[in-house]
Image: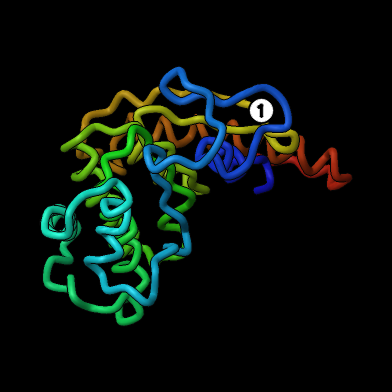
């Protein structure tokens, strides 16, 4: 925590400017928020005064799409996340997992060049989290968008990612850039899956030990 993961996403989204240097997506410098950089938040960031389909269609309206076309596309993505029968419901009537599915449908529907996800499943129970991980992979496999996904879960990172970046404690730097070359669907109990998990945990334990020593904790970790 506190190494700058969410700050990095906010820079990529154009919400804040870097204190030094520049951030680029597709070779272009990010200077402001852009609908081409989609964001999924942990707290959903849905509009409570709109129903489900209009939440998903919101970005499409900003892109200038007519009401019939944007509702048709919104329904397509609601179907992908298993919520086609909830299109006319208010988002206040939905569970946390359902709200996050609406948020995922909304961002993918606008067809952004990059999708930024800030611990989107962090507040969900284990079963809902596993279900949404599977749904996210299904949607991603259809369009292969670039997704930058922040998580505290090593297992989630190895399960979802093609590449895992481990950051150092403050100030945040890249400690490990690990390619995950495993086919989908991935087996949590597979030998290579568990090897990659351990490799990443070892890096995190090492960094945590350094952090404790810097803060005067002086702790050490053992397997």
Q: Evaluate whether residue 134 shows in this view.
A: no
**Which residue appears at 74% of the width and 37% of the height?**
170
Residue 14 horizontal/vertical position (percent): 54, 39
**Which residue appears at 57% of the width and 44% of the height?**
15
Q: Quadrant of residue 171?
A: top right
Question: 126 left or right of 207?
Answer: left
Q: How many marks?
A: 1
What residue occupies the far top of the structure in this picture? 27
Q: Evaluate whether residue 111 shows in this view.
A: yes
What residue occupies the far bottom of the structure in this picture? 93
Residue 34 horizontal/vertical position (percent): 44, 40
Between 90 and 174, the one nearer to me in the picture: 90
Residue 7 horizontal/vertical position (percent): 62, 42
Callout 1 crowding tier (Cα within 10 Å): few <14, some 14–19, many ≥20:
few
Quadrant of image for the C terminus: top right
**Which residue appears at 39% of the width and 69% of the height?**
47
Question: 200 left or right of 75?
Answer: right
Q: Give the labeled residue for mark 1.
A: 173
Q: Secondary structure at mark 1?
A: loop
Q: Quadrant of residue 187?
A: top left
**Which residue appears at 17% of the width and 66% of the height?**
83
What residue occupies the far right of the structure in this picture? 216
In the image, residue 13 sits, relative to residue 44, either above or below, namely: above
Question: 17 left or right of 162?
Answer: right
Q: Quadrant of residue 103?
A: bottom left
Between 57 and 65, the one nearer to me in the picture: 65
Question: 53 left or right of 15?
Answer: left
Between 67 and 91, the one nearer to me in the picture: 67
């Amino acid at each position: 925590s506190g190494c700058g993961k969410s700050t990095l996403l906010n820079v990529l989204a154009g919400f804040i400017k870097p204190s030094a240097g520049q951030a680029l997506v597709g070779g272009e410098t990010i200077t402001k928020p852009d609908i081409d950089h989609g964001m999924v938040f942990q707290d959903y960031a849905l509009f409570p005064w709109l129903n489900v389909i209009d939440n998903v269609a919101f970005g499409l309206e900003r892109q200038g799409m007519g009401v019939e076309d944007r509702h048709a596309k919104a329904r397509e993505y609601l179907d992908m996340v298993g919520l086609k029968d909830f299109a006319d419901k208010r988002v206040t009537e939905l569970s946390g997992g359902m709200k996050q599915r609406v948020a995922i449908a909304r961002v993918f529907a606008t067809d952004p060049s990059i999708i930024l996800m800030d611990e989107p499943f962090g507040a969900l129970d284990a079963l809902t989290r596993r279900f949404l991980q599977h749904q996210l992979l299904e949607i991603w496999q259809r369009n292969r968008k670039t997704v930058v996904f922040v998580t505290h879960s090593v297992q989630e990172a190895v399960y979802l990612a093609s590449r895992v970046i481990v950051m150092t404690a403050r100030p945040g730097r890249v400690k490990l850039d690990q390619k995950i070359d495993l086919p989908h669907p991935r087996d949590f109990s597979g030998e290579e899956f568990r090897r990659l998990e351990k490799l990443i945990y070892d890096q995190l334990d090492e960094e945590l030990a350094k952090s404790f020593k810097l803060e005067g904790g002086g702790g050490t970790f053992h397997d």
